[in-house]
Image (cartoon, helix red, strand yellow):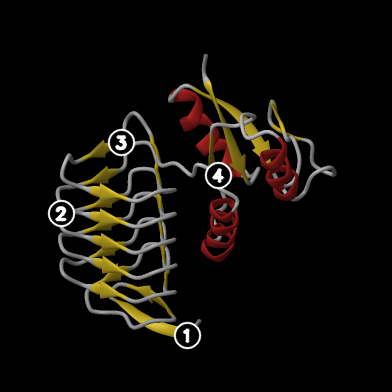
Amino acid sequence: MNKKIAIVGASGHGKVIADIAEQLGYIVNFYDDAYPSKKYIEHWPIHGTCADLLALNITDNTIVDSAVVAIGNNEIRQQKMQLLKKNNFNLITLIHPSAVISQYAKIETGTVAFAGSVINAFAKVGTGCIINTAAVVEHDCIIEDFTHICPNSALAGGVTVGKKSWIGIGSQVKQLVTIGDNCLIGAGSVVVKNIPDNVTVFGSPAVVIKGN
């Protein structure tokens, strides 16, 4: 019998995570705080809010075997994951079958690696991260908790990205560069030097355009 997974967050991001989960043999159960005004996402029914899911676990913890948070916003994803963990849900990591993950890479709980992504040898990816479609995390990179590496981004060897940062679609980061916590790297940027905490950068080469 297939295992059941609760997906918190019924958005476009959630659709892709549901697709990954089904390819891995899970039966998908969506929960979203927009319920009951929103009852379906494509063909998948939404079974309730996050609070409904927590109550369900209290009454019968066999309803779902595992849970994952499918919310792109780093701060909200962290909050929901912490809430589920506090209520003893089994938060899992999902890896798309086409992702290339080194046997020497380390990936923490709640992270999702999308189709065509690469996580190379001795890279470390923290809790609740998103390694999006065709993103490349090269050898010895460190991706801290709740960070989002967007589609087609490439991090060269030895890059460090802090907590709750956002590496925009198609960005490139030079080897050994450090990007701080809570940073936003604009789409298509080329990062060639260290970036401090709490800033938005953009361009080629990327420069700070504002504080966060």
Q: Earlier in the sequence, mark 3 or mark 2?
A: 3
Of badges 3 and 4, nearer the viewer stands 4
Q: Earlier in the sequence, mark 2 or mark 4?
A: 4
Tell me how far mark 1 sits from mark 2, CA to CA. 30 Å
Residue at horizontal 33 percent and vertical 43 percent from the top: 134
Tell me how far mark 3 sits from mark 2, CA to CA. 15 Å
Disc 1 marks which amino acid? Lys
Above or below, comparing residue 138 to residue 47 in the picture: below
Read off the residue under disc 2: 139
Would you say 35 lies left or right of 102 here?
Answer: right
Disc 3 marks which amino acid? Ala
* Tag 1–tag 3 contact (CB < 8 Å): no
Disc 4 marks which amino acid? Phe
Q: Earlier in the sequence, mark 1 or mark 4?
A: 4
Disc 2 marks which amino acid? His
Element on which disc 2 rests? loop
Q: How many marks?
A: 4
Q: Earlier in the sequence, mark 3 or mark 4?
A: 4
Element on which disc 1 rests? strand
The quadrant where residue 166 appears: bottom left
Residue 5 drawn at (x, y percent): 56, 32
Read off the residue under disc 1: 210
| Mark 2, other Cα within 10 Å: few <14 / some 14–19 / many ≥20 | many
- Farthest-out residue, right: 37
Tell me how far mark 1 sits from mark 4, CA to CA. 38 Å
* Tag 1–tag 4 contact (CB < 8 Å): no
Element on which disc 4 rests? loop
Above or below, comparing residue 46 to residue 106 in the picture: above
